[in-house]
Amino acid sequence: MDTQKEALRRIINTLANKNEELQHFLDSIDGTRTGLQEESCRVMSELEAELEGLSSALEERGAQLRDIIKEEKQRKEAELQRQLSEGNFALLSCKELLDFANQTLTITNEEEFLTAAKQIKERVTMAPAFRLTTRPMASENMSQFTVDFSAEKAGLQRLNFLPVPRAPEIDASGCVVRDNSITVAWRQLSDTDGDGPVERYELEYRKTNLNTSLRATGDACWEKICDITDTQVTISGLKFDSPFVVVRVRARNKAAAGDFSEPVAMETRAFNFGFDTATAHAELKVQGDTVTWEPQGVKGHDARLRGKENKNSSRSATPSPNKTAGSRAGRERFAGESYTVLGDQEINGGCHYWELCLLADWKSVSVGVAYRGSLGRFDQLGKSTSSWCVYASQWLQSSLAAKHNNRAKALDWPLPQRIGVYCDYDNGELMFVDVDQLRLLHLFKAKFSQPLVPAFTVWCGGISVATGLQVPSFMGNFVSINRSPSADQ
C-alpha cells in the first residue's frame, strides 16, 4: 500500500505542476490579449497621427505652391498695368499733338507757321508715344507652374507599414554562464521579405524558478538591455538567486521592432543564504546582507574596550551560561564574547562559494563554517572541532590566522578587504582566498561528518556578505594546485 501511496503522491505532484503550468499559460494568454488591445490602440493612434501629418504637409505645400502662382500673377498684372497706364498717357499726348499739327496747317502767316512747326517738331521728339515700348513686358503664359503629381500619387498609393525584422534565433551553443555572468548569442534569420537591415537588438531577461512556462509572467518583470549592435551580449555582475535566467531577444529596424525570439532558460544555480537572525548575538545587528556590531551600554560591552577603565574589576566579561540562558530569548542565540551569527542554509554536499567584505572601522572578524548542531552558544569560531575559520584583526596590531580546534596558524599576508570562501563538502576542502589579489590564504582539509553552515564573528565595525555566487573560474587553479596530503587538517 505504501508503494501505491508513493505512486499516487507522484501523480498528485505531477498534476499540481501541470495545473500551475496551465494557470501560467492562461495568465499569459490573458496578458497577451490585454497587450494586444493596448498595442492595437497605440499603432492606430500612430497611424492617425502620421496620416494627419501627411495631410498637413500636403496642405502646407499646396498653400506654398498657390502663393507662388499668386505672386507671379500679381507681378505680371502690375507690369501690364504699368504698361497700360503709360500707353494711355502716350495715346492722349499723341492725339493732342496731332490736333495741334492739323491746326498749324491752317495758319497763313509765315512767321506764325514756322514757329508752330518748330514747336511740333520739338514735341514729337519728346513725345511719350515715341519712347514707349509697344511690346508687352509680361505674357499670359503660366506653363512654368504646370504640375504633375502622378509619381507622388503612386507613392501615396504605395504607403504601407514599416517592414518588421523577423525574430532572431538564440544560439544555445553560444550561450555561456560563467562567473555570475551570462553571454547570450543569437542568429538573425535571413531577410526574405525585404525587411531591410537590422539596426540594433534588444535583449530582455528575468529570473525564474522554472525552466518551463517561459512566457508565463508579464513584461513588467523583464530586465532590458537596448541598443545592442552585435549578435551577442554579456550581462555581468548578476546575483544568481534563482535556478534559471530566461532570455529573449528581438531585432529593430529603424523605429519598428520585431517579435521576440523563443525564450531560452539558462541554468544559474548558486549557493544562496541569508543570516539566521535567531542565532545572532544580541549585540549584532543584521540588516539584509550586512552585520554590524552595536554594543549595549554607554562604554561598551566587550572587556577589550573597557579593560583599561576597569583594571580592578574582578567580574568576568563572559556571563555564566545559566544566567544567559535564562535572560535571553531564543536558545540558539550566541552570547558572551561569541559575537557570532550563522547562515540560514546548510551545506551537505557539492561545491559552494561566497564572499565577505570588511566594512569601515572593523576591528576583529572571523569567517568560516561550522556544524550547526555542535557549536555551543558561547563557542567562538575556530576554538572547537566543530568550526573552521580565518580570523582577521586590526585591534592593537594587524594579524591574520587560520583557526580550528583551538589551534591558530598565522598567515603571512596583508589583511584582505574581500575574502572568498570555497567549500567542497564531498572532498573535505575549505579554502579562503584574497579575492582582490587572487591569493590563496589557507586550505583546510577535513572529513565533514555533519551539515555545515556559513559562520561569522564580528567585533567592532561590520561586514557584508555576497551570496548567489557561482564558484569563480579562478578557483579551479587553486583547487588543482593545492590538493595535497600535506594540507592542514
Image: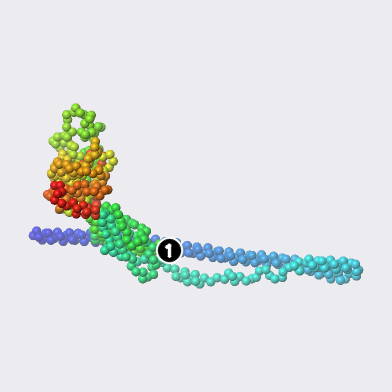
Q: Position of residue 403 (x, y in %)?
A: 17, 43
Question: Which residue is rendered at x = 58% and y = 64% of the image?
Answer: 67
Q: As drawn, which residue projects farthest toward the right?
A: 109
- Nearer to us in this view, 416 or 326: 416
Quadrant location, the N terminus:
bottom left
Q: Is residue 369 above or below residue 18?
A: above
Q: Is residue 408 above or below residue 69?
A: above
Question: Quarter of the image holding residue 160?
Answer: bottom left
| Circle 1 Cα neighbour tier, 10 Å, few/some/many (<14 / 14–19 / ≥20) | few
**Is 124 situated left or right of 306 in this image?**
right
- Regarding residue 451, the answer to whether it shows in the image is no
Instruction: Say which residue label 1 marks.
Output: 47
Q: Name the amino acid, label 1.
A: Leu
- Nearer to us in this view, 338 or 76: 338
Q: Position of residue 439 (x, y in %)?
A: 24, 48
Q: Is residue 58 above or below residue 379?
A: below
Q: In what element is the residue under mark 1?
A: helix
Question: Quarter of the image holding residue 285?
Answer: top left
